Image: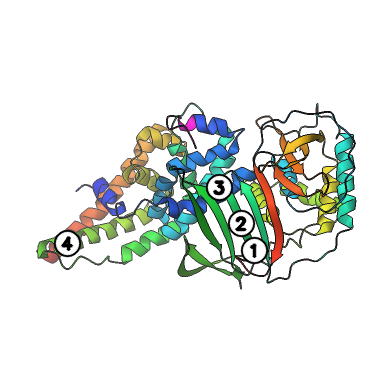
Amino acid sequence: MDELALLKDMADRTPLPSETDLAPARARLTALTQASAAPPPVPRSRRRRLVVSGVTVVGLAAAITAVVSFGGLDPVGIAPPDADAVAFLHQAADAARKLPTTPPRPDQFVYTKSQTADGLRETWLSADGTHDGLIEQERELESGEVVLDSIPMPGCRHRQRKVLKGDQDTGLTEPCTPDAAYRADLPTDAAGMRKYLGQAADAKPKDLDTLVHFAFTETYVSPQTMVALFEVMADFPGLTIDEDATDLAGHPGIGLSWPQPADQDTVTLVFDPHTHAFLGMADQSAVLEHAIVDGAGQRP
Amino acid sequence: MHEPDEDDATIIGTSLHRPERFAAIFDRHAAHIQRYLARRLGQQRADDLVAETFLVAFGKRASYDLGRPDARPWLYGIATNLVRQQQRAEVREYRLRAAIAPEPDLDGHADRVVAQVSAAAMHRQLAAALAGLSAGDRDVLLLIAWEGLTYDEVTLALGIPIGTVRSRLNRARRKARAALSATQAKETANHG
């Protein structure tokens, strides 16, 4: 046998992975594609002043950071933010200031249930990043059958994390730093938040988008940080408001959008007009439930 | 869901404004990319890096050459770059394979056992030879020998001219052949 044939022989023992083997990697990709999702343009209706009040939840930061991660906006030709959109955000900030601050305990989990393009998704992420979390994600096969992927998220303890293959414990560990779902590190004022997002913009788009989805959308962020995010958003050039937006589950709400780089359509974040809750991104996602629970796999 | 007769370029083009369509590229190519990564770095790293490959590809999709209907060489290029970043891990993997003799099938006929032991010895020598190649030579050799890419596909994957592909392949093959004839000489001496 010549050396090429022998080389091939050497490699033939390696099997092609199955769909199940690849499911965790696929889930990481779809998390990113959803965080970057741009819904088709929504027809704009007449803009009106809104009266809003209520509570806010996380998810907003995802879109803000996603915008910043695309390398910033070219200010030429972009209008100043729409006055109604600014008003909405200031009122959201006022409402957020009144929220009680009860962060999760380190041993608790942030639970998020959302509707995605692939199906239902539930995540349990460790508040301090040291406990083992879980993602359960529906996936549609080519045949049309829907399966549930159960993806363990090992915690990082003493700088070591279990290495899993699929959901099998290999017995090995790898170095790590904890991925805390309770983002106590985020700035709590607008100036700090601007600086934080500006720094994040220097990161590679891949890092930032992955960070955005896992780090913001399914985490717990304090009301002070939400206030800071709303205030920063209110300055976005070209910010506009639209009353006829809906999330993926069809819940009607207020859409906030701003211009994207040339190859992207408008991003629209949908909010409940009465409670201010972030509902999702039109046609891409819908946050159905967001809560703190005591154990991975427990529902509120 | 994607149309079965849409080529990769069409899907990637659509994914620029409908990002969720990019998952179809994963469905078409992830298995081969994962196996390539497993062959070079072992299964554990391969599972992580196949995800990284597609995250990077998604981030770069705006610069994909839409004149190329098949995205697999592009993906091999991204995966190979990630392997480069893990070069020390890869070289350790080959050294490990060079040191460990896989168990021969002892239920087999005596001649087959001898043949298996010889093949194993040659695999070990090849693994040691791979560890000794330069990264560029190893990339070309393995994309051709393990993944069956054509010279043209290797130029797409690695972004190098075809002349460089040829010269790196020749050099790598020479070193592999040298490693094998050393082993064969030793085997002949041992078994008479």
Q: Position of residue A292 (x, y in %)?
A: 71, 64
Amino acid beneath label 3: Leu
Residue A122 is tagged as 2
Residue B187 is tagged as 4
Q: Earlier in the sequence, mark 2 or mark 1?
A: 2
Residue A299 is tagged as 1
Q: CA distance from mark 2 to mark 1?
A: 9 Å
Q: Quadrant of residue A239?
A: top right
Q: CA distance from mark 3 to mark 4?
A: 48 Å
Amino acid beneath label 4: Glu
Q: What's drawn in magenta, residue-wise?
A: B1-9
Q: Quadrant of residue B90?
A: bottom left
Answer whether labels 2 and 1 touch (C-beta < 8 Å): yes
Q: CA distance from mark 1 to mark 4?
A: 64 Å
Q: Nearer the viewer, residue B112 or A6?
A: B112
Q: Secondary structure at mark 3?
A: helix
Answer whether labels 3 and 4 touch (C-beta < 8 Å): no
Residue occupying the far left of the picture: B192
Amino acid beneath label 1: Arg
Other-residue count near label 4 (Cα within 10 Å), few / some / many at <14 / 14–19 / ≥20: some
Amino acid beneath label 2: Glu
Q: Which residue is mark 3?
A: A29
Q: CA distance from mark 4 to mark 2?
A: 58 Å
Note whether A22 is above or below A51 in the view shown.
Answer: below
How does the figure colour the protein chain or chains? rainbow
| Chain to which mark 2 belongs | A
Answer whether labels 3 and 2 touch (C-beta < 8 Å): no
